[in-house]
Amino acid sequence: MDRMKRNLTFSYLFDFILLGFPTRPAFQLLLFFVFLAAYLLTLLENALIILAIRSDGQLHKPMYFFLSNLSFLEMWYVTVISPKMLADFLSHDKTISFNGCMTQLYFFVTFVCTEYILLAVMAFDRHVAICNPLRYPVIMTNQLCGTLAGGCWLCGLVTAMIKMVFIARLYYCGTPHINHYFCDISPLLNVSCEDSSQAELVDFFLALMVIAVPLCVVVASYVTILSAILRIPSAQGRQKAFSTCASHLTVVTLFYSTTLFTYARPKLMYAYDSNKAVSVLYTVIVPLLNPVIYCLRNREVKAALKKTILCKGRGSREDVALSN
């Protein structure tokens, strides 16, 4: 306990340096505008989806309740990382305080873990809808949906808290240079000056629970969904049933494939810049694409978005006319 207090007290006195993307200044400016556009578009897309779901009574269903939770989550997910990354593109000072780094890491881990579990819950929802359509309203009640969504957030918060207890107590020498553009677990383990095996073991065990268990739920759900779809006699019925879960399956594939590539590898692999490119996929590209995927593959969402945008545009024109 005394060693932990001494390490924490010392850690508060220094900063980390995020190496980010070391390139020429002109290219740094280009990256700034590209990532700024991606960040703003992600916020806009997800905000529109939440607004469309809330304003359209036809979308007040469990599937869209979980989708609005996913959109809300991803708005904060990108906000934890993007503002600091964008500031670093325009500044020579790429330092981040110990407290700032631990705060960023805590919320990042919270949102990642929550998304893993939320995607599994969404897969379970599709399983019930397709395999038990007659009992779907009875099973997926508002109370159960609220409990499942709250459980996702609670699991994410608790998992992140446990990980932080072991990460924050590590001893760091001098001014550690983190070979990444945000504070992540593996880069921090790499710059620790003491044995981090205990923190690695805890991180591995929790990652296994948070990734493997939801992944098993997703796989089991889609195996039963596929089996149920294949038993539908008409081709049109099979296509309609599959279309209700195609967008979710695409989002799951994108998120799991990119994050598993990073978190299933040894920490020493973080010394290479390839992991930064992969991290960009799941911290910038995937959150940007997810709303587009749901809109392109889902007619109800597209119709609600058109209605929302048209209503907002009409309302703005009416306000201007009244003011004149």
Image (spheres, helix red, strand yellow):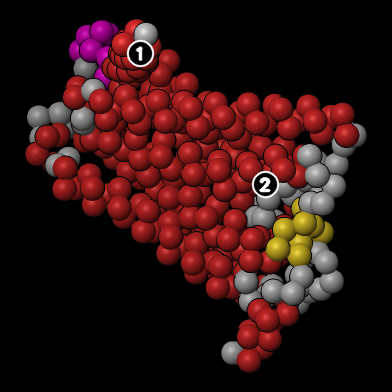
Q: CA distance from mark 1 to mark 2?
A: 40 Å
Please give left or right for residue 171 compared with residue 82 in the image: right
Name the residue rendered at 43%, 43% in the picture: 73
The answer to whether 5 is drawn above or below residue 127 in the figure is below
Name the residue rendered at 25%, 25% in the picture: 55
Q: Which residues are magenta?
A: 233-241
Please give left or right for residue 76 compared with residue 185 in the image: left
**Front-most of residues 308 and 123:** 308
Name the residue rendered at 62%, 71% in the picture: 168
Please give left or right for residue 117 compared with residue 269 in the image: left
Q: Quadrant of the C terminus?
A: top left
Residues packed near mark 1 inside 10 Å, few (<14), some (14 to 19) or many (20 plus): few
**Front-most of residues 11 and 256:** 11
Residue 310 coordinates in the image, percent (x, y): 34, 11
**Disc 2: which residue:** 84
Q: Is residue 301 visible?
A: yes
The answer to whether 17 is drawn above or below residue 30 in the figure is below
**Front-most of residues 42 and 143:** 42
Does 239 lie within the magenta span? yes
The answer to whether 197 is drawn above or below residue 46 in the figure is below
Does 228 lie within the magenta span? no
**Disc 1: which residue:** 323
Residue 220 coordinates in the image, percent (x, y): 34, 41
